């Protein structure tokens, strides 16, 4: 099974995803909206406001065919137009109630319509430049979906303070786990000189409320180690400036052993004064180039990356040392909890990779400085199609936490298969940890409200590259969109978020909306069915992680992840098994420990189960496996059919690109079905009750 290698495209030859503005054909709406948009008044005449006004102007021109005047003079005709200004501005404040002003937070905004006999005004108000740019895109999008102006009234504030995209981009231009072309930031061990695409990317991110971006891979090797030095900082400062215009801060992934690699020191021991001094100087230099630098992202002591363990120090020692250097400038250290011994021998019954993050970090609760945030993958393993949530969420009350989600589809079909992740993410965010009693949802932990943290939020591993449509699969754009929207407000329903994306990307044709919505909302369920249901996970080819391989995994010297034999499959992670369930709140521990109560979609993650075990439906486990794979592969036909019904209603290029991917998905789903079913048949010798052909 081959990957599709997506080539990058030359400058300007790419789509703008949900920001591809199309002409509004509705004359009625145009008539209504014109008085409100024919002028744009900016009350704070600076670089950022002008940029926001230009964004709005360009959008209005494309959507409504009129070119608004941008006015920055002190004499203003406030009768007709859109008024953009900051709180505190006298003119603006005249239009606002006290309570309204109080409700606008740092990155939030208000959009309000004043329509009287003599006035037709849209007000866009924020406290900061970031709020203005987020509000600008929100306004543009509302106009695009023809929102009723007489009732348009929005006050929005992001729930989580950090909403960051992680790029796993390497300096040679490749992207680790990237499925959409090469890096838009780097090529040939250089920072790319043209920033056109970066700017368009910043626009896309601002339109979904992102406020941070880490542009290099967490595995920091070779030239990338030098990114924090004047060798690259002048170019990075230009990237930072481009992002700044759109309310986004730049962060850099660092190699913990940098003082050795580039500082000429003999150690990177975090408690060594010379090491601290070296980092202090380095940070000072970075801020001299990038005054609003966000901070460092660190993968330490994991998968061959150096870290404090080398010196017998803890992760808190390592993170705090860096945090002290960043503190005077307002920077943060985002420290990854993805720490485990990939070479561990798990043949004894207590060793369990799932336990690693908690074991490494829980004892350190309370030891991290305030500007350290622990970035935790959603589950205890590695972005599988289904995992339980990491018990670290809520397990460390005194440590800032971010949730790490993988937008790029490493284990979820690599942007060949349609796999909309919003439904999975929403389930995770709605999980009630019980850490502070009922209602201690993950979304309330990572937005900071449960424990009152200042730094916390969302990190998403990017799925974009230089391909024509940014994401390889056109419909995978919905994953980036949804990540941003959930990070902004995890209370929103994914149906709503997905629908909004469809309307903005494909328009409001009823059939188009209905079919694509169905495809998105059902795609993860379908993918799970024909790959690894019941919490099984993995079973992918080692290395590139694509396609079925029931016993394949790069570190599988000690056997398979699922430990299948001829009688049973799954890992006993109960309190009597590896003891993993003990890391959860007792509420969940009891549920996960009990094979009858354990959610069935996680059954084999928590339990070792004989193939003849009867599931709630009355089916045996083995029969469920067969059925699931047959049904899943068959349901891909429904995806194809739903898409086929849209022929002629969708831009032809996009239609063809998606059709091609769906065709591959079907072929690869059949391969998954046959490889996995054959594996189980050979292991168990139990035939399919329905007599279907298991061997292809
Ligand atoms: C996975 C992935 C790696 C990545 C790692 C990480 O293991 O396959 O490519 O480096 O996660 O999150 O650090």
Image: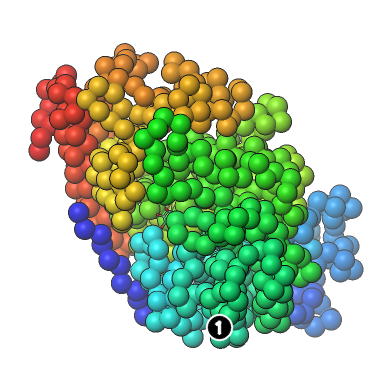
Report which residue position mark 1 lands on.
232
Residue 631 on image: x %, y %: 25, 32
Asked which quadrant contains residue 248, the reply is bottom right
- Give whichever of 612, 557 is nearer the camera: 557
Location of residue 393 with respect to 237 vertically, above or below: above
Residue 545 on image: x %, y %: 31, 52
Horizontal relation, residue 363 to residue 621: left or right: right
Asked which quadrant contains residue 178, the reply is bottom left
**Residue, x 58% and y 30% (percent of image)?**
584
Can residue 508 be seen here? no
Q: Quadrant of the C terminus?
A: top left
Residue 191 on image: x %, y %: 49, 81
**Residue, x 34% and y 38% (percent of image)?**
561
Residue 591 on image: x %, y %: 52, 21
Q: Quadrant of the N terminus?
A: bottom left
Ligand 1 is found in the corner quadrant, namely bottom left
**Residue, x 87% and y 66% (percent of image)?**
88
Label 1 within 8 A of ligand 1 by Cβ: no
Location of residue 452 with respect to 269 vertically, above or below: above
Can residue 668 be seen here? yes
Location of residue 452 with respect to 157 vertically, above or below: above
- Give whichever of 133, 487 is nearer the camera: 487
């Amino acid at each position: 099974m081959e990957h599709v290698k997506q080539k990058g495209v030359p400058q300007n030859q790419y789509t703008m995803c949900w920001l591809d503005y199309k002409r509004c054909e509705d004359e009625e709406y145009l008539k209504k909206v014109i008085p409100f948009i024919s002028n744009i008044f900016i009350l704070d005449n600076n670089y950022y406001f002008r940029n926001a006004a230009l964004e709005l102007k360009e959008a209005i021109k494309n959507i409504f065919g009129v070119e608004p005047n941008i006015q920055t003079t002190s004499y203003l005709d406030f009768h007709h137009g859109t008024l953009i200004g900051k709180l505190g501005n006298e003119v603006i404040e005249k239009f606002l109630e006290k309570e309204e002003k109080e409700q606008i937070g740092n990155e939030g905004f208000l959009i309000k319509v004043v329509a009287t006999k003599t006035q037709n005004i849209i007000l866009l108000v924020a406290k900061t430049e970031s709020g203005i740019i987020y509000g600008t895109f929100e306004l543009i999008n509302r106009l695009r979906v023809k929102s009723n102006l007489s009732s348009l009234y929005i006050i929005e504030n992001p729930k989580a303070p950090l909403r960051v995209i992680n790029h796993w981009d390497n300096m040679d231009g490749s992207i680790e786990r990237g499925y959409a072309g090469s890096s838009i930031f780097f090529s040939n061990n250089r920072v790319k000189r043209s920033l056109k695409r970066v700017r368009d990317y910043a626009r896309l991110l601002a339109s979904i409320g992102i406020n941070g971006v880490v542009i290099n891979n967490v595995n920091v090797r070779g030239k990338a180690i030098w990114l924090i030095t004047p060798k690259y900082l002048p170019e990075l400062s230009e990237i930072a400036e481009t992002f700044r215009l759109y309310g986004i801060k730049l962060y850099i992934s660092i190699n913990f052993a940098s003082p050795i690699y580039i500082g000429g020191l003999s150690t990177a021991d975090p408690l060594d004064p010379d090491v601290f001094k070296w980092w202090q100087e380095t940070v000072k230099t970075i801020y001299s180039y990038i005054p609003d630098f966000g901070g460092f992202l660190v993968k330490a002591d994991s998968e061959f990356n150096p870290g404090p363990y080398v010196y017998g120090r803890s992760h808190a020692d390592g993170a705090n040392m860096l945090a002290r250097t960043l503190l005077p400038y307002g920077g943060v250290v985002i420290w990854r909890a993805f720490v485990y011994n990939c070479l561990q021998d798990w043949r004894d019954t207590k060793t369990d990779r799932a336990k690693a993050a908690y074991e490494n970090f829980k004892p350190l609760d309370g030891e991290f400085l305030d500007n350290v945030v622990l970035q935790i993958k959603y589950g205890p393993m590695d972005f599988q199609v289904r995992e339980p949530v990491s018990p670290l969420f809520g397990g460390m009350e005194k440590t800032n936490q971010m949730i790490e989600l993988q937008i790029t589809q490493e284990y979820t079909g690599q942007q060949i298969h349609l796999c909309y992740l919003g439904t999975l993410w929403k389930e995770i965010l709605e999980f009630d940890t019980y850490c502070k009693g009922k209602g201690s949802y993950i979304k309330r932990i990572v937005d900071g409200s449960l424990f009152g943290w200042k730094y916390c939020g969302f990190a998403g591993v990017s799925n974009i590259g230089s391909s024509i449509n940014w994401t390889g699969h056109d419909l995978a754009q919905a994953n980036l969109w949804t990540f941003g929207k959930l990070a902004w407000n995890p209370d929103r329903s994914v149906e709503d978020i997905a629908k909004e994306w469809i309307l903005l990307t494909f328009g409001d044709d009823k059939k188009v909306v209905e079919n694509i919505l169905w495809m998105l909302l059902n795609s993860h369920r379908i993918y799970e069915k024909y790959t690894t249901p019941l919490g099984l996970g993995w079973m992918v080819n080692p290395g590139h992680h694509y396609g079925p391989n029931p016993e394949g995994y790069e570190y599988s010297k000690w056997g398979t992840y699922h430990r299948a034999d001829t009688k049973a499959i799954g890992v006993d992670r109960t309190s009597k098994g590896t003891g993993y369930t003990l890391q959860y709140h007792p509420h969940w521990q009891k549920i996960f420990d009990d094979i009858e109560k354990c959610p069935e979609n996680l059954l084999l993650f928590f339990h070792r189960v004989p193939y003849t075990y009867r599931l709630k439906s009355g089916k045996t486990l083995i029969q469920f496996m067969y059925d699931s794979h047959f049904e899943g592969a068959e349901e891909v036909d429904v995806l194809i059919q739903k898409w086929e019904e849209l022929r002629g209603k969708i831009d032809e290029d996009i239609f063809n690109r998606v059709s091609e991917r769906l065709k591959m998905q079907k072929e690869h789903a059949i391969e998954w079905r046959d490889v996995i079913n054959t594996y189980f048949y050979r292991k168990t010798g139990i035939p399919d009750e329905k007599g279907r052909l298991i061997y292809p």
